Image (spheres, helix red, strand yellow):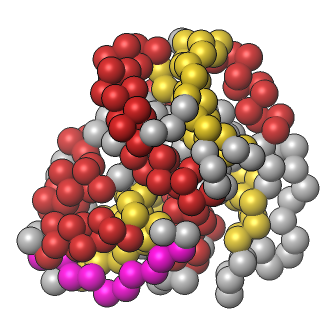
Amino acid sequence: MEYIELNISVADAEQSEIMMALLSDFPFESFSEEEGALKAYIQLSEWEQSCHDVEQMLSQEGVTFSVADVQTQNWNAEWESSFEAVDIAGERPIRIRAEHHAAAEQGVIDVVIAPRMSFGTGHHTTTALMSATIAASAVEGKVGLDMGCGTGVLAIVALKCGAERMIAVDIDDWACDSCHDSIALSGVAERVDVRCGSIDVVAGENVDFILANINRNILQMMMAEFAQVLNPKGWIAMSGFLQEDAAAVAQAAREQGLEMVSEQEQDGWVVMVCKKL
């Protein structure tokens, strides 16, 4: 499998976040932020279908960019070797790490992932926001759905916080493979049902909570299915969208009988929790 690396010149972290949000409307699988640059990765087949629209959008934004081919195997090794552990503070602190990093100290939730190219390493603001939200929620003994699971990091956090069982879903085979590896490394594989596909693969299921760190368009598109899957008084935590899009997401949720109970913003990104009436 071949990937394309899109290298975008950015002036600062704020512009990088904005560009990441815009690119999230396209099938990019992973992002890497460096000083003065944002790198985005997409499968070659997906790039061939969307390159015209992406390049047009970037030109309208007035940013300079370059495109390069990346061999997945070589990139994967480089990605994992350069991946740094992430520590998330809070009443229930969390450490997200790869297998070669030092384990979390006693009292810290230890999450081990196989980062590969899948979204969900903990470095992005939305992953950290979602992880902190899970740690502050009552998930003990509950069954949850991690939609767009990536590495499976959110499902693992939920299980480490006491959830009984998780369904982890992603449309990308590469992410599902990463999720399988991550749940094994974290010692929770027997409590995670990994499914490759879209929202249709959980039709007929009932869960107590949903974790959806995707993007605004997909959240709105799937909101009716989310409401159907949720048990009465269940809740959904959503992120992957900017503050300016929060009202639209909240409205889509209300239309499906999901009432917003909390909203938190960091660096322009939002995590929103809604409860089923």
Locate the C terminus by quadrant.
Answer: bottom left
**In-image side of 97 versus 69 (left or right):** right
Up/down of 194 relative to 5, above or below: below
The image position of residue 203, as x and y in percent, is: 19, 48
- Residue nearer the viewer, 219 or 104: 219
Residue 137 counted in the magenta span: no
The image position of residue 125, as x and y in percent, is: 58, 63
The image position of residue 208, as x and y in percent, is: 33, 71
Residue 261 counted in the magenta span: yes
**Residue drawn at the location 25% of the way across and 51% of the way down:** 217
Up/down of 198 relative to 86, above or below: above
The image position of residue 188, as x and y in percent, is: 62, 54
What segment is highlighted magenta in the picture? Answer: 257-266
**Residue found farthest to the right:** 102
Give residue 205's quadrant in the image: bottom left
Can residue 14 be seen at all in this image of the molecule?
A: yes
**Residue drawn at the location 72% of the way across and 78% of the way down:** 89
**Residue drawn at the location 70% of the way across and 25% of the way down:** 76
**Residue drawn at the location 49% of the way across and 26% of the way down:** 42
- Residue nearer the viewer, 99 or 274: 274
Can residue 153 be seen at all in this image of the molecule?
A: no
**In-image side of 230 versus 42 (left or right):** left
**In-image side of 106 versus 219 (left or right):** right
Locate the N terminus by quadrant.
Answer: top right
**Residue found farthest to the front:** 62
